[in-house]
Structures are given as C-alpha cells and as structure tokens.
Amino acid sequence: MNVRCLIAGMMLLTCAAPLTLAAEPANETPVKAPSQPESSVKTTTSTTTIEKTETGAVKTTQVTGPNGNTSTSSTTVTKTENGATYSGSVTGPNGKVSTREGTITKDGNSVTREGTVTGPNGKSGTVNASTTKSDGQINRQVTRIGPDGKQAVTQASATKVSRGTWNTSATTTGPNGKQATSAGSVTKNDQGVQREATRTGPNGGSATIKEQRSRDGNSVTKNREIDRQKGDKAAKKKNSGEKSKKRGKGK
C-alpha cells in the first residue's frame, strides 16, 4: 500500500486536538438518556485534484460538509534536494482565509514536517510531525502548539496485518493532560482505500468514522461518514440542566 495513503489513514485516526485557530461549531444533537446516547451520522465529501508541475505539484481541494457548506484549499508543493516545501491557503464557508506553510525533510526511512498555520485573526500555531517506517510498522508523532503556547501531542502507529491491510491506533494528550484514543484499520481494495476508526474522548464520548477514497486519474474523491455519540458525562450534564429548568418553572 502507498505510504502516503497509510499516513493519511493514520491522520484520520489522529484524535481531534483541543488546539484550534478557529472555533468549531458545537454539536447540538440532543441527548435523551445517559444509558442510550443519541447518535447523528453526518457525511462529508471532498474532491482533491493534483496537478504536477516542473518543480513539484499543486493540490486543490473542495470539501462539502453535512449542511451543504463548502470550503476550498490550495497548496503548492515545491521539491527540494532532501524533501519539499509547501504553502497554501484554506477559505472557509464564511469566506475567511487561513494560511499554512512549512518544510518536509526526508532522511532514509524518516520524514519530518515543520509547519505554521495562521488563522483569519492573524494568530499562528505550529504543527511538527515525524514519521518513521520499518518492516511492517509505521510510527508517527505530531505536536501542535496553539497561539497561546498550549500544546497537544499525538502518538500514532500502524501495523501491517496482511497485504493491503493495516491496523492503526493513536493517543492524543491535550494541554490539560487529558487523553483521547483512537483505533481502526486501513484497507486497500479494488474500490480504492477504506478507512474506519473509532475515537473516544476524555469524557467517554465517541465518534465512528468511515471513509472511502477513490482515484480517477489525477482526481481523488473521499466520502466520510461520522457517527458521534456523547459520553455519559455530557448526557448527565444535559439532563441535570433540564431538571433545573423544570424546578425553576415550578416555583
């Protein structure tokens, strides 16, 4: 299996770090009971086109979220003697633009990446990653440092099970020491590459992610389904708030 595909699969398993340059929308799915958290499946589709150039390549991606909103990104990769440099931008559904740039260095079976991401508000964070490959094993460490200096570290690994099939796992430790874990698999078949992972957050909430990746010439299409379930702590907090409102109305 192509190592780039496998690394992308490992990044799918990378638990969402608590460091972000822009606020993410809250999950407003109602929870009726702690013992039976309500789930919501959301689908995201992305199409990436890669055009090779004399000095590298230009990658353009459009992502359509479950609500129909779209974001676009463009990244230019320039080859160097021992790796590459990259720079690009991401335009969100609201028209706000974030930029990113960095370097990729190859040394034998090791690859390191050092990058900077700057949000629409001008604040910057860094992403440093290192990947090592050996016989039937790939290990990856990603360190994200936000504008406020707080950092999250992800340790991910992939182990070859058979031809075209790998088992993957990851653990992310946030700035407060809390951990989120993930486990799944990456499989290459006639339809393309299939990835599946289950992420579990510090509060017990989980998300099951299924992704199908297919290629047609220089175009790559990804269909991703995310099924989120809130943990017992979130459900108890929700139910506790509803009970407080009822008591207040009864006064």
Image (cartoon, grey):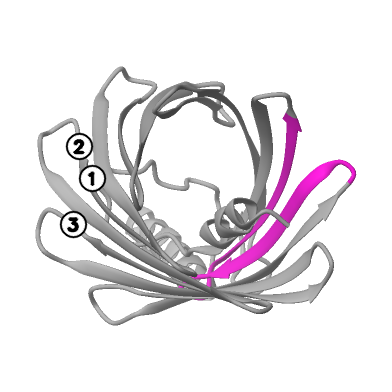
Q: Which mark is residue 21?
A: 1
Within-10-Å neighbours for mark 1: few <14, some 14–19, many 20+: some
Residue type at numbered disc 2: Gly
Does 201 lie within the magenta span?
yes
Residue type at numbered disc 3: Gly
Q: Are marks 1 and 2 in contact (CB under 8 Å)?
A: yes
Quadrant of the snapshot with the N terminus: bottom right
In the rendered image, which quarter is residue 228 located in? bottom right
| Residue found 40% across the figure and 46% down from its top | 26
The residue at the far top in this view is: 95
Q: Which mark is residue 146?
A: 3
Secondary structure under the numbered disc 3 in the rendered image: loop
Q: Position of residue 36 (x, y in %)?
A: 68, 67
In the rendered image, which quarter is residue 99 located in? top left
Q: Position of residue 34 (x, y in %)?
A: 59, 71
Report the front residue among 229 and 35.
229
Residue denoted by label 2:
119
Residue 194 is left or right of residue 144, and the answer is right
| Residue found 39% across the figure and 21% down from its top | 93
> Which of marks 2 and 1 precedes in the sequence?
1
| Residue found 23% across the figure and 73% down from its top | 175
Q: Are marks 1 and 3 in contact (CB under 8 Å)?
A: yes
Specify start and end residues of the magenta stretch as a single range. Answer: 190-215
The residue at the far bottom in this view is: 177
